[in-house]
Amino acid sequence: MRKLLFLFALIHLNCFAQNKYLTRTGTVGFEASVASFEEVKATNSSATAIINSENNEFAALVLVKGFRFKNALMEEHFNENYAESDKYPKATFKGKIIGESNNYQIDGTLSFHGKSKQIHAIPIRCLVKNEIIKISGDFDVNVSDFDIKIPKIVQDKVSESVHVSFAFDLKKK
């Protein structure tokens, strides 16, 4: 009887897993540059994301310390002074893909620096080919939405508005 229950549970879990697509090598980037000053831009190429194709739910997780800048000092300041990545090590997005036939959007909640913000109608590009779902898009948020303070000494060099971009190639789980 125990073996039968185990077999049933294994088949049940396998059926649900067939509707999930996953990546651990997604790319998330952001830019908060201001014209005429040093570029404030970083990329993280180890973001995890999952899509449930049955209900179009989407979730992504980024380790904040994984963002890489051109300038090591800027990376250090970002982690220690702005993102406080020891205190807030993760950024997440949970939402749902809506739309049809090459006109897709995503609605959800972005959580960063201990704060959450609802984000609506992010246009995304979506392509399904050979059991891989490729999605990408971009949107803007304000640092003030996440209680991030920009010191007066660099206030003119860092934008209040941050442009976030993402790209994920999700494979069937």
Image: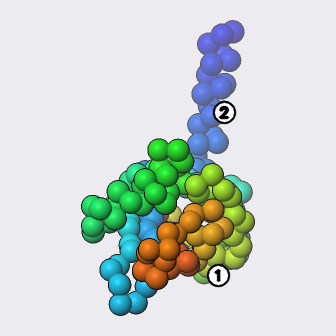
- In the image: residue 97, left or right of residue 173: right
Q: CA distance from mark 2 to mark 1?
A: 33 Å
What amino acid is at disc 1?
Asn
Disc sitting over residue 103 in the figure: 1
Q: Secondary structure at mark 2?
A: helix
Could you say where residue 1 lies in the image, as x and y percent from the top left?
69, 9
Is 25 drawn above or below residue 140 in the view shown? above
Mark closest to the chain's N terminus, 2 or 1: 2
Is 26 drawn above or below residue 153 in the view shown? above
Choose between 89 and 105: the one closer to the eye.
89
| Residue annotated with mark 2 | 12
Indicate how the structure is coloured in the image.
Answer: rainbow
In front: mark 2 or mark 1?
Answer: 1
What amino acid is at disc 2?
His
The picture quadrant where one finds residue 6 is: top right
Choose between 28 and 59: the one closer to the eye.
28
Could you say where residue 10 lies in the image, as x and y percent from the top left?
60, 28
